[in-house]
């Protein structure tokens, strides 16, 4: 493939032009001498290789930029967690029926699907940074509508607007973080997206136990404002800028993200050369994604999102209280135990992401979710046959905690990390929109169907989830590539080469 030849030549050629001009004075001393360009360039590339591969301490600008981005993830978590602690009070205050509140809860995923459809287009044409700011306008408007709601319709409108905002955020945040971070830090930094979702959800549960639902909605505006007011101070994605032909701005952005004294020569040229190769190809719409060259990336991206949701996560998390009650447990004990497991395991996944690799962590997580669902199914089976009644509630609690802990370790974050890595820049917008839309659609299906499935058979429901989680192990082992330690450009070369061989 042409892009492979271009990348290899850019790393070995001594005549590649230096794109970056941000530190003109310091860099001119290295490159202005025409007599010994060859020897200096060789030393320069060795310096780049050693400095980029050995440095594991993130520069302050990169850390700050990632922190601003994941405030959007925190907003995502607050939106998901809002309905659980507020249900009883909202139904009393606004005289809502169970059906009306169910609409209020589920309409979030409808809004998220709408946001997902346009997420790629907005992020591609306006930029990742502006897309995050734009999404917060939806979220702020939605929270305000919920705050002043006097009837169900205002609640629906507010929840729908918040859903549109988080549908956009669920795509743009992991993609932006993946595009700005170096390969040795990318996995862990991108996984912080899931960690902040977890923190937002858990803190909303906690705060919602003590404050009125209107005040909780106002509190939800705070992280929205933090990100909205902070995005003007962070750089845009160097890869997006290069795609738009703004090469000097791409180099300047890359220098800010890597630190003013960092050498970005090799990385800047690699981004430019690969972008130039992709510009020879046309931008693909969603229909155009179904071509042989994108087949593996699309299969991996869609497959992970479908299996993530059909493994039962939203049904188990959204209706955990009813699961614990059905199993004969106290709902408060179960909920507290879930929060106590979820945050530490998500944090552990962040630290392991760039050490163990994506595939081993994903395999371990899928095996754990399979085991958790099997234990929960066994608990309900024992109830059905009236055996070991003293043991079955504990077995259900252990099963749910094993499932939630294992999911938080890998299945929650890694599909989003891999989604942000495997698609080339010329199709990332349309592919990201499709993958995010499918994720939210599957989320709605499971959220809507879970109570009906539990009414049909609690044992059958969890055995079904266990089977899907077991299939996930096979899917990951056979199809999911390891992306640890590779630049985004190297990942594209590997995927496209494999596709062409087949």
Image (cartoon, rainbow, N blue to C red):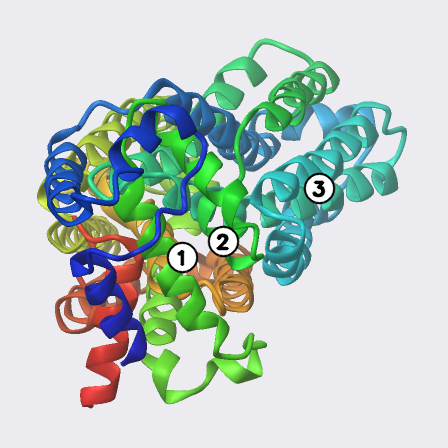
Q: Check the image and report above or below for 422 versus 85.
A: below
Residue 291: percent from left, percent from top: 43, 87
Quarter of the picture holding the N terminus: bottom left
Q: Which residue is mark 1?
A: 272
- Say which residue appears at 24% left-offset and 72% top-offset: 4
Res 285 quadrant in image: bottom right
Camera-side residue: 287 or 92? Answer: 287
Camera-side residue: 324 or 77? Answer: 77
Camera-side residue: 358 or 24? Answer: 24
Secondary element type, mark 1: helix
Res 397 quadrant in image: top left
How far apart are the two marked residues, 2 and 3, measured between alpha carbons?
46 Å
Q: Check the image and report above or below for 195 versus 89.
A: below
Mark 1 nearby-residue class (10 Å; few <14, some 14–19, many ≥20): many
Q: Are marks 2 and 3 in contact (CB under 8 Å)?
A: no
**N-terminal-most mark, 1 or 3:** 3
Q: Which residue is mark 3?
A: 101
Residue 368: percent from left, percent from top: 15, 49
Q: Report whether 71 appears left or right of 323.
A: right
How far apart are the two marked residues, 1 and 3, measured between alpha carbons?
51 Å
Q: Is residue 407 visible?
A: no
How far apart are the two marked residues, 1 and 2, measured between alpha carbons?
6 Å
Q: Check the image and report above or below for 271 versus 8.
A: above
Residue 126: percent from left, percent from top: 67, 50
Q: Are marks 1 and 3 in contact (CB under 8 Å)?
A: no
Mark 3 nearby-residue class (10 Å; few <14, some 14–19, many ≥20): many
Of circles 1 and 3, the one toward us is: 1
Secondary element type, mark 2: helix
Of circles 2 and 3, the one toward us is: 2
**N-terminal-most mark, 2 or 3:** 3
Q: Are marks 1 and 2 in contact (CB under 8 Å)?
A: yes
The circle drawn on residue 242 is: 2
């Amino acid at each position: 493939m042409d892009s492979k030849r271009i990348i290899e030549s850019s790393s070995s050629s001594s005549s590649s032009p230096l794109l970056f001009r941000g530190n003109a004075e310091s860099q001119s001393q290295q490159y202005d001498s025409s007599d010994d360009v060859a020897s200096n360039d060789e030393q320069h590339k060795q310096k780049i290789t050693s400095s980029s591969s050995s440095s594991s301490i993130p520069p302050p600008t990169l850390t700050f930029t990632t922190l601003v981005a994941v405030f959007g993830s925190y907003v995502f978590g607050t939106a998901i967690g809002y309905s659980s602690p507020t249900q009883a009070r909202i139904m009393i205050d606004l005289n809502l029926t169970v059906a009306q509140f169910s609409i209020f809860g589920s309409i979030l995923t409808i809004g998220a699907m709408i946001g997902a459809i346009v997420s790629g287009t907005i992020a591609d044409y306006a930029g990742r940074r502006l897309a995050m700011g734009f999404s917060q306008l939806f979220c702020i408007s939605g929270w305000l509508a919920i705050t002043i709601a006097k009837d169900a319709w205002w609640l629906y409108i507010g929840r729908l607007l918040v859903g549109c905002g988080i549908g956009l955020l669920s795509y743009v945040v992991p993609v932006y973080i993946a595009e700005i971070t170096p390969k040795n830090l990318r996995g862990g930094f991108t996984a912080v997206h899931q960690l902040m979702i977890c923190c937002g959800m858990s803190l909303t549960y906690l705060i919602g136990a003590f404050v009125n639902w209107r005040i909780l909605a106002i509190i939800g505006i705070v992280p929205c404002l933090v990100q909205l007011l902070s995005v003007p101070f962070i750089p845009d994605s160097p890869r997006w800028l290069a795609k738009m032909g703004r090469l000097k701005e791409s180099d300047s952005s890359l220098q800010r993200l890597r630190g003013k004294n960092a050498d970005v020569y090799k990385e800047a040229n690699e981004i430019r050369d690969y972008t130039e190769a992709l510009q020879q190809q046309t931008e693909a719409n969603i229909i155009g994604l179904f071509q042989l060259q994108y087949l593996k990336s699309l299969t991996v991206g869609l497959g992970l999102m479908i299996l993530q949701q059909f493994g039962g996560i939203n049904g188990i998390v959204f209706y955990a209280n009813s699961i614990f009650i059905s199993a004969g447990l106290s709902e408060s004990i179960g909920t507290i135990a879930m929060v106590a497991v979820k945050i530490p395991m998500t944090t552990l996944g962040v630290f392991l992401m760039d050490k163990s690799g994506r595939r081993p962590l994903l395999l371990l997580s899928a095996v754990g979710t399979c085991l958790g669902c099997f234990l929960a199914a066994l608990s309900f089976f024992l109830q059905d046959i009236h055996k070991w009644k003293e043991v079955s509630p504990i077995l259900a609690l252990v099963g749910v905690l094993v499932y939630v802990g294992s999911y938080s370790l890998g299945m929650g974050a890694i599909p989003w990390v891999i989604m942000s890595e495997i698609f080339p820049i010329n199709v990332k917008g349309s592919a990201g929109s499709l993958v995010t839309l499918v994720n939210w659609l599957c989320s709605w299906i499971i959220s809507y169907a879970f109570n009906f499935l539990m009414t049909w058979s609690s044992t059958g429901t969890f055995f079904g989830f266990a089977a899907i989680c077991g299939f996930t192990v096979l899917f990951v082992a056979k199809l999911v590539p390891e992306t640890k330690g590779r630049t985004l450009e190297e990942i594209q070369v590997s995927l496209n080469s494999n596709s062409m061989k087949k």
